[in-house]
Amino acid sequence: MSPARFLIGFAQRIRRPGAAISIKHMLTLSFGLLIATLAGLGGLALVRMQQIDASAQNISEAHLQGVADSLRLAELATRRHSLDYLMAMSEKDKVAEVATQIDAIDKEIKQLSTDYEAKLTDEEKLKVFKDAEQALRHYSTLRQGVQAFVMVGGSAAAIDLITSEGARRFDDARTLLLQLSALNVQAAKEEASLSNETYLKTRRQMLILIAGLVLGASLLGFRVIRSITRPLQAVVDLATNVAQGDLRPNMQAVQSSGTEIGRMNMALAAMTERLREMVESVRSGVDT
């Protein structure tokens, strides 16, 4: 029998007033509910695991990497600021060497900024990054002035430019980069909190499903046990009565005739009834 035909027949049997459910149907239903519940638990766990994995990947690849990149930019900006100080205090013949180091850092900052911007999707972080990038460019324009002062012997003026205007512009850029890092940390915390909430929600749902499965299995198990033990007890009572010579009809057999054992009990009751009729017929023949 196909599953569809079985379900249709089972539904018709349930709708029928006073209809009893056979042991085969109850066992099949129990097994089907068990499989369906286990499949539901597995599907739920799989979906939730995928959500948690996606959150963990987002934390690792987006937020934590964003923290590392923004801190790296702040570090490079600090090194650039230190080299500007070094240039302001250098002799003329050392300026070219320091300038080469500054160019290398500027190149690394530009490459890292380009890569980082390509990964940004959050509008707030993108705005802060753009402001930080603009602040870095604004700070880097001081290099020409510092280098020009040093080349004409104005080291004092170069140092004053770096310690006043340069320090202010550098602090602006560094503050924005640290703010960007803080935004990434906050986003990572929120994503981690969401993952934890998803895990707790999944655990609650699975506990509810497991509790439902245990309750349903207990009820069906009780029903199956009763459908077996009561008709069996009726069979035992009928056999005991017959052994004692009592051939009266067994009403319990009629009441429990819905299951396989109940139908067997009915057959035994019918056989007993025919045996009683035969005995009465023999007695009537003897009397006459």
Image: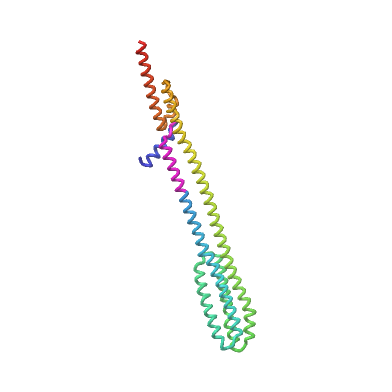
Q: In which quarter of the image is the N terminus?
A: top left
Residue shown at the point (51%, 49%) measured from the top left: 206
Which residue is nearer to you in this view: 8 or 49? 49
243 shown above or below 131: above
Q: Position of residue 40 (x, y in %)?
A: 46, 48
Q: Is the magenta stretch mostly helix, strand or loop?
A: helix
Residue numbers of the magenta segment: 18-40
Q: Where is residue 189 in the image (x, y as percent from the top left)?
A: 57, 61
**View extreme (front): residue:** 243
Residue shown at the point (41%, 32%) measured from the top left: 259
Which residue is nearer to you in this view: 85 or 134? 85
Q: Where is residue 87 in the image (x, y as percent from the top left)?
A: 59, 83
Residue shown at the point (54%, 69%) measured from the top left: 68
Q: In which quarter of the image is the C terminus?
A: top left
247 shown above or below 69: above
Query: Which of the 4 image quadrants contains residue 143?
Result: bottom right
Let me know if residue 27 is in the magenta part: yes
27 shown above or below 282: below
Let me know if residue 202 is in the magenta part: no
The answer to whether residue 145 shows anywhere in this view is: no
Report how many numbered discs are placed on residues in the image. 0
The answer to whether residue 108 shows anywhere in this view is: yes
Which residue is nearer to you in this view: 172 or 266? 266
